[in-house]
Image: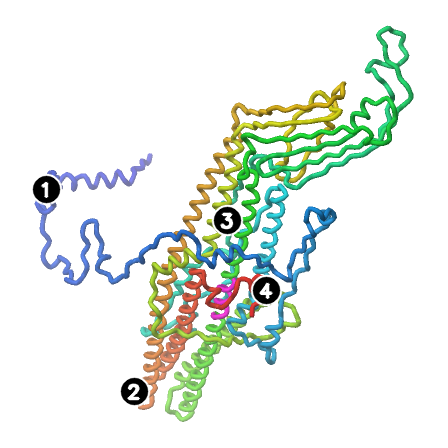
Amino acid sequence: MIFKIPLAWMLSATMLPALAQTPMLNPGQNVQDAPGHKVPPAAENPIVPANVPQTAPNRTSMDTRQIRPMGPQPATPDAPSPAIRRAADTKTRPDAEALHLPNLRVLNLIGSYRQATMAPLPTGTTGRVQTSLRDGRLYLSLHDAIALSIENNLDVEVSRYNLFIADTDVLRARGGGSLRGVDLNIEQSPAGVGETSVPLLITSTAQTGGSPLNVNVEDLSQVTQAGNTTQQNLSANGTYTYSPGPPLPLFDPTVIGQAGYIRRSDQTSLISDTGSTSGTDTSSTTGPLSFVSAALDYQEGFGPGTQIDVNVSNAAQVLYAGNSQYDPFHAPSTSFTITQPLLRGLGRGVNLRFIHVALLDQKITQLVFLQQLLEVVYGTSRLYYDLVSLGENVGVKEEALAAAQKLYDDDASQVELGTLAPIELTRARALLGSSRLDLVQARALYRQQETILRQQLLRHSGDPAASFTEIIPTDRITVPDDPPSLDVSSLIKDALSNRPDLAQAGLQLKADEASLKGSRNGVLPNLSIYANAQTRGSSLVPYQILGSPGTGEITVPGPLTEGGLRLSTIYQGGVQLNLPLRNRIAQADAARDAIQLREAESRRLKMENEIRAEIENAVIALETAQQAYKAAVESRNYQQQLLQADLDKLGVGATTNLNIVQDQSYLAQARATEVAARSDWMKARIVLDRSLGDILDKNNISLDDAIRARVP
């Protein structure tokens, strides 16, 4: 039989003798003072230099490092900037996509029943492309690239249509309808193949470990890029909606008409008329009677919750007359009813809440359109400058290939003369092959970037009027020697005032507060007063709640004269009370909507905090990119000097051909790093402009021109 002993027990058993021999410490006794403690020899003590930072209890060595402290955080501005307020209040609408509504004025009855017309999807503009085409090549400046993106980009086009959707919601709310909502999503531009921050390694240096003079650069601007997907939702409410609240008055007056033919027997008693001789049968009948029945009903609601109902019909004649009558208005019955809520549904703030929300959504949509513009301008600028950098990288690879070819030719001549070993020619041939591979890869990346950028510039990629085979960017990246100093606190304050995404989140909170008014009002009992006057009416009018749940559809009331045995002139009034004793549904809706408002406030505050961090990260990225570019330029200069020095040594036989091959590879890598560092600086600057919300102003783009798709 085999017994298995746990490993922990075995370790415990082996450690028990040692533990038994180890003296225990008394409370407050140091280890050095413990019995049996031996001080290690001096030779075994590590020697710590005096300049090494020492840690202390509850401290680290952070205070000895030269790290700039974080920027001070300014207070939140009281209101958005005037530019953002103008953008939210703009009345400019697209021209080519114009929505044509019929004449909806009160006196134009026909216009209310005509359909709105919408122009076909615009084909985009190609004139700017055609003027820049030469020999099948598109010579493109940054401004032209941005203008083409604004005019033709389909993401911007979708946002233009969203402006009209917000307008239709305003129209629907003014008629007494609920809202269908607006789109709060924005699309981000594709990253492109230039997204790689560290330049691709030169093939010949990938296996040698690289030169000690080369530096790598990191694109820190990626830290501040919002979202990890191509779509970003700017909603502060998440996926939840607010409760519909109390029924809405019918702000659009409604007329209900009914006409028909009725033929009935002239029976004056409900007792059978089968001819019974029973004394209880008092029925008497004459020939059938014919009538033209007609009814006309008018309903309208008002902001305070007041609603009126006017009804005219000949129901009394049809029910009680003893002679046929084909004139439906020979002796009509009229009824006028007015109702006014006293608790639930009382007040303009409750009944006009959807109009207030729709007007806020209109402003929100305009700011969402502005945010979409920022994303398109930002994305197009990145794609454009990445194409510039990839083009410069192609030039670097071409120069490296030319240098490798010259080295190979020189070595081949020396091998023929017998002054150079054939193995050196093999090394030169390997460098030549790797340089060709680098050039092929660089050109492929450039072509891929062209394809991605073209997608942003044209409405339809297959449009023959805008056909080109190559994009030649005409702008270059210039890194200033002395960049201006950046005040982080001031930049954060500007961003909080100029960011349209933050401003529209604040407007969403106002819309949520208007919706919450309806939820809170829905908790109250339904207490209303009503008054009714009738001619030839019945003795009792059943009371019904007028209005609709925001759909615009109403319930046609029954004839007010139906159900009585006598016809009289009636004046009546009263109080209607609907009192749910527990009211759990309304309480749950009001509580949930209040919670959702707090959630929206939290999301809006989170967005503000993210903007603050985004500005700081953008400043850090720009400053780091500036220093990285300087280091890359110095590395390239030193690498070039090393190559020239080794070439001079090679002329006198003081070095080997292997060093020349390595120096040329390292120089090519240093040049590629310099190109990447310059690109990273430009992208960091664009990210800062985007984070500040002023990238349109810096590119001379007007919001009204962008809405009309006519950028000068």
Contact (Cβ within 8 Å) of mark 2 with mark 4:
no
Which residue type carries mark 3? Ser
Q: SS for tag 4?
A: loop
Q: Which residue is mark 3?
A: 235
- Whole-angstrom CA distance, mark 2 to mark 3, is 70 Å
Q: Which badge, 2 or 3, is on the more N-terminal residue?
A: 3
**x then y, percent, for residue 25:** 12, 40
Q: Which badge, 2 or 4, is on the more N-terminal residue?
A: 2
Contact (Cβ within 8 Å) of mark 4 with mark 1:
no
Residue 209 in view (yes/no) = no
For residue 29, the mark is 1
Q: Which residue is mark 2?
A: 654
Q: Which residues are magenta?
A: 376-385
Q: Is residue 446 magenta?
A: no
For residue 336, the mark is none
**x then y, percent, for residue 10:** 25, 40
Q: Which badge, 3 or 1, is on the more N-terminal residue?
A: 1
Which residue type carries mark 1? Gln
Name the residue nearer the viewer: 280 or 254. Answer: 254
Above/below status of 245 relative to 413: above
- Whole-angstrom CA distance, mark 2 to mark 4, is 67 Å
Q: Which residue is mark 4?
A: 709
